[in-house]
Amino acid sequence: MKEPMLQVEHLKKYFPVKTGFLKSKPLKAVDDVSFDIGEKETLGLVGESGCGKTTVGRTLLQLYPPTSGKVTFRGQDVNSKSIHQLRKEMQMVFQDPYASLNPRMTVADIIGEPLDVHHLYKSKADRQQKINHLMDLVGLSSDHATRYSHEFSGGQRQRIGIARALAVNPSFIVCDESVSALDVSIQAQILNMFKDLQNELNISYLFIAHDILVVTYMADRIAVMYLGKIIELADTREINRNPIHPYTQSLFSAIPIPDPETARKNKRIILQGDVPSPLNMPSGCSFRVRCPYASEQCAKEAPPFTDRGDGHYVACWNK
């Protein structure tokens, strides 16, 4: 078997939250997450808001220092020291195309900043040529280079952010809700562009989203998160055909079906109760308070993440 490009083992990220005078509790945003991503592969990370998806992406790129765990990129440990060299290999496209771009910088300066930091050009003419090539790569005109970010639409701003990430020629990109702030028609253009760039530049993605249809279109494999933990991980076709965890089943039952007759036959699984607070997690399985199959064992001990065959991993006692 070929070694994966990226390996994440038992990654944890806890944030201390003050609960009183000189008192604090750990908020377990990411709690013992493990996965790997191969060359030119897209792993989709899906789950509802607040489950820890973005924290996973930011922690493995050292934007947040991890509480514990290990991240390995092509055999090299990713830590606070090595990340300075690995920035050229590992990049991120942020969720908000409005907040992630400096309004005081022109498009040329935004895209050229990584080139300046890593000294990736020989002359000013070479720098400008690379900026023009990157803009062309993401579907922007070189005439836009002297404009500022506020002069562009949301889709164009996201293209600027993608060009900035591509400037250092990375082989791995974390896409953090990269299309959630865009109109549906623009989403399709950006998603197709991500796929074209993957084929052209051999890039691997960790594609974070809450929209299952978007993740299903983009990803080779899908990981489902709930309250800081990955509860199911499988090939995209397999998890669409056979979701095992009750939470995953509920997510997939909510996908709109365009055929009215099929939609009527489709049974919507509506979860009861509220999502527990990450500061006061229930004992055992964190999903048990909303699960229709919960048993005494679920309250006593968290289920292990086990392989149910063909790389389909699930953390559940009763499914």
Image (spheres, rainbow, N blue to C red):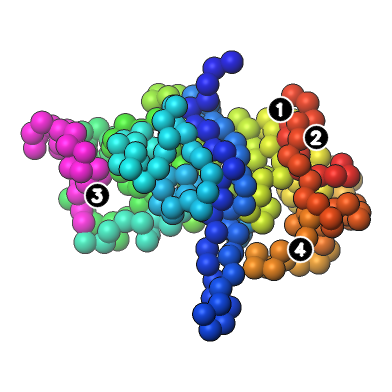
Residue matched to label 3: 110
Instruction: Check the image and name the residue furthest to the front.
Output: 22
| Position of residue 85 measured from the top left corner of the image (x, y, whole percent) | 30, 36
In the rendered image, residue 79 lying in the magenta stretch gets the answer: no
The residue sitting at 8% across, 37% down in the picture is 124
Q: Nearer the viewer, mark 3 or mark 1?
A: 1
Mark closer to the chain start, 3 or 1: 3
CA–CA distance in space, label 1 to label 2: 13 Å
Residue matched to label 2: 242
Q: What element carries label 3?
A: helix
In the rendered image, residue 128 lying in the magenta stretch gets the answer: yes
Residue 258, image quadrant: top right
CA–CA distance in space, label 1 to label 4: 28 Å
Q: Horizontal placement of 245 versus 70: left or right?
A: right
Residue matched to label 1: 311
Kind of residue at badge 2: Asn
Q: What stretch is highlighted in magenta?
A: 105-129
Instruction: Determine crowd level at label 2: few under 14, some 14-19, many 20+ residues with C-alpha closer than 10 A.
Output: few
Kind of residue at badge 1: Gly
Residue matched to label 4: 282
Tell me: residue 278, above or below residue 205: below
Q: Horizontal placement of 4 versus 309: left or right?
A: left
Tell me: residue 167, above or below residue 181: above
Instruction: Check the image and name the residue furthest to the top.
Output: 1
